[in-house]
Amino acid sequence: AHGYYYSRWDKCIHSSRHFSDMVYIDNYIFNKDEFIQFSSTVGEYVGYTELGVFNARRFNSDPNLLQSERAQVETYCKHNAEIRQAAIADKT
């Protein structure tokens, strides 16, 4: 199949049972190349290509967008990890 391929993957990574080291990562991929990423450890977008650098500047200048992305560790990652951990703990 010919054409263009775009995807956006977000993920939560942790190794602590108490989620104290939780990291949220939001990747933007075009034609299998990552061109921009938000990482909660960095706290802003980083561009890896010309398009990614352009968009990172644009996204980083929006305080509402940055606040929303930074909040994902608590509202998305930890929230869902707690639900999953409780479901697993109930089964053991």
Image (cartoon, rainbow, N blue to C red):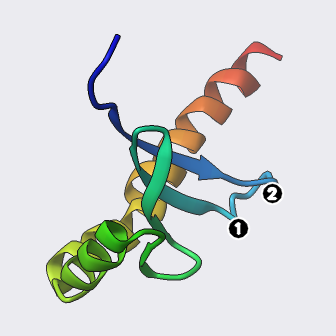
Q: Amino acid at mark 2?
A: Ser
The quarter of the rendered structure image containing the C terminus is top right
Cα distance, mark 2 to mark 1?
6 Å
Residue 20 numbered mark, or none: 1
Above or below 28: residue 87: above
Q: Can you give x and y, in whole percent of width and height, for residue 83 in the image?
A: 53, 35
Mark 2 touches mark 1? (CB < 8 Å):
yes
Q: Is residue 37 left or right of residue 81?
A: left
Q: Can you give x and y, in whole percent of width and height, for residue 30 in the image?
A: 37, 44
Q: Is residue 69 left or right of residue 74?
A: left
Q: Is residue 67 visible?
A: no
User: Picture quarter containing residue 16?
Assistant: bottom right
Q: Amino acid at mark 1?
A: Ser
Q: Which residue is mark 2?
A: 16
Above or below 63: residue 28: above
Kindly identify the residue that appears in the image at 58 percent across and 50 percent down.
12
Q: Element under label 1? A: loop
Depth check, front residue: 54 or 58 = 54
Q: How many marks?
A: 2
